Amino acid sequence: MSAVKQGGGSGSAQDVLARLADVLEARRDGADPESSYVARLFQRGTDAILKKVGEEATETVMAAKDGVPARIVAETADLWFHTMIMLAHFDLRPADVLAELERREGQSGLEEKALRGTREGDVAGD
C-alpha cells in the first residue's frame, strides 16, 4: 500500500509539490552554484536541465522493467524532482501541470490524444 493511502507524509501531495517548487525557485533565484546542486543545474542552462530530465526518465523506465517497487518509486521521485527543475526554469509550477491534468480528467485518452493532435496541427500550421 502506498504512503499516500496509508496517510504517510505531511500535507497533501499538492502542498508537497508547491513547497518543493518554492525551494527550487529560491535556489534558482539566489543560491550559490558552488554549494547548491539545483543552483548549479540552473546556472548550466536549458540543455543541461533537459539532459538530466532525459537521464532520469531512462532510469525510471529501467527501474520499471526491473519491477522492484522501491526502485521504481525512488527513480520516479528523481524524475519528478528534475522535471520540477525544468518547470521552474520556464517559470512554470506544478499547479500548471495539475490544472492540465484536471482539465483532462474524465476525458477518454483516445479522445484527448485526437484533440491534442488537432491542436498540435493547428500550432504547426497543418
Image (tube, rainbow, N blue to C red):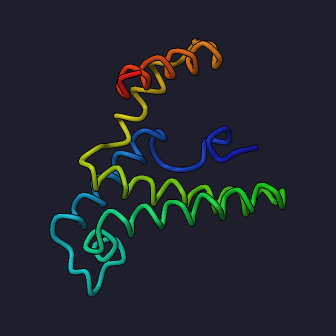
Residue pictured at 48% horizontal, 67% vertical: 52
Nearest the viewer among 21 and 82 is: 82
Nearest the viewer among 102 and 112 is: 112
Nearest the viewer among 105 and 121 is: 121
Rendering coords of residue 10 (x, y %)? 47, 48
Q: Quadrant of the C terminus?
A: top left
Taking the view exactly as shown, the residue that stands out farthest to the bottom is: 34
Q: Quadrant of residue 60?
A: bottom right
The number of callouts visible is 0
Q: In this rendering, is residue 22 above or below 94?
A: below
Q: Quadrant of the N terminus?
A: top right
Q: Quadrant of residue 29?
A: bottom left
Q: Quadrant of residue 74?
A: bottom right
Rendering coords of residue 4 (x, y %)? 62, 41
Asked whether, in this view, residue 45 is left or right of residue 78, the answer is: left
Asked whether, in this view, residue 100 is left or right of residue 40, the answer is: right
Residue pictured at 57% horizontal, 66% vertical: 55
Taking the view exactly as shown, the residue that stands out farthest to the left is: 30
Q: In this rendering, is residue 8 above or below 63?
A: above
Rendering coords of residue 83 (x, y %)? 45, 54
Asked whether, in this view, residue 107 is left or right of residue 120, the answer is: right
Asked whether, in this view, residue 11 is left or right of residue 95, the answer is: right
Residue pictured at 32% horizontal, 62% vertical: 46
Taking the view exactly as shown, the residue that stands out farthest to the front is: 126
Residue pictured at 83% horizontal, 61% vertical: 66
